[in-house]
Image (cartoon, rainbow, N blue to C red):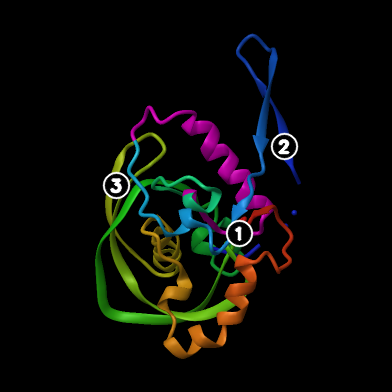
Amino acid sequence: MRFRPPSFSKISCVQKNNDQFSILIRMILPIYIFGQPVLRKVAEDITPDYPQLKDLIGDMWETLAESEGIGLAAPQIGKPIRLVVIDLDVLSDDLPEYKGFKQVFINAHIVEYDETNTDVSEEGCLSIPAIHEKVTRPTRIHVEWDDENFEHHDEWIEGYLARVMQHEFDHLDGKMFVDRISPLRKQLIKSKLRALTQGRFRCGYKTKVVRK
């Protein structure tokens, strides 16, 4: 999900117990753009022994920061697995309740939608650059997920976080926010979506488009 400042890789020094330092390299990964088949696949659950999971999560955080986003799902970097990172701390000036909120969601599933109240808000997506549309979503959802330590969570979530979760978790089910707009709006942006599949767009972060 798009909101927010753009490098290639970042190098950090990590201090070990013996006061020596090791080099930690985080990669800025390309964002897969609308039209890439992986964005339409239903992602799979993973286990704690998924190869280099901690490194992947670290790279996703760096990629998210560099692409001015607040949420990133693994299919958006070409990985068809149920992994999402969300950073709402960048919105904390306007939404102070999310101060310090940075969270990893593994094997996330929306169990239930509370349709009692819905909200209409504009959404954008790193995989659909320069397109923003109003999307109607429930304001409260029942979600199950594992955190990065594979501790299980089963909670009802509401407010802005519920919207962001729905947007990001849609990616895990092969869906995108443009699937949730009216037929008329879909028709009006059809040429823009076609341009994305042809690589005719500009954005300030690394991308990967369909090669034909």
- Image quarter hosting the C terminus: bottom right
Q: At x 59% / y 70%, what residue is drawn?
A: 94
Instruction: Decide if residue 40 is on the left or right side of residue 144.
Output: right
Residue 111: x and y in percent read 24, 59
Rounded to the nearest whole Å, what is the CA distance between mark 2 and mark 3? Answer: 32 Å
Q: Is residue 181 above or below residue 197?
A: below
| Residue 77, image x, y percentages | 55, 48
Q: Secondary structure at mark 1?
A: loop
Label 2 vs label 3, nearer the camera: 2
- Residue 48 marker: none
Query: What residue span does the magenta drawing correspond to?
Result: 47-74
Q: Regarding mark 2 in the picture, which secondary structure is present there?
A: strand
Instruction: For mark 3, give the secondary structure.
Output: strand
Left or right: 57, with 169 as reference point: right
What is the total number of numbered labels drawn onto the structure image? 3
Tell me, yes or no, if residue 61 can be seen here: yes
Mark 1 in CB contact with mark 2 (< 8 angstroms): no
Tag 1: amino acid: Gly
Considering only order in the chain, which callout, 3 or 2, is on the residue closer to the N terminus?
2
Q: Nearer the viewer, residue 152 or 57?
A: 57
Where on the picture, by quarter, is residue 130?
Answer: bottom right
* Up/down of 155 relative to 138, above or below: above
Q: Mark 2 = which residue?
A: 10
Please give the name of the residue rendered at 70% of the width and 30% of the height, measured from the top-left corner: 12
- In x, y percent, where is residue 200? 70, 69
* Along the viewing direction, whichever of 19 and 131 lies nearer the viewer: 131
Residue bearing the label numbered 1: 69
The kind of residue on which mark 2 rests is: Lys
Q: What kind of residue is marked 3?
A: His
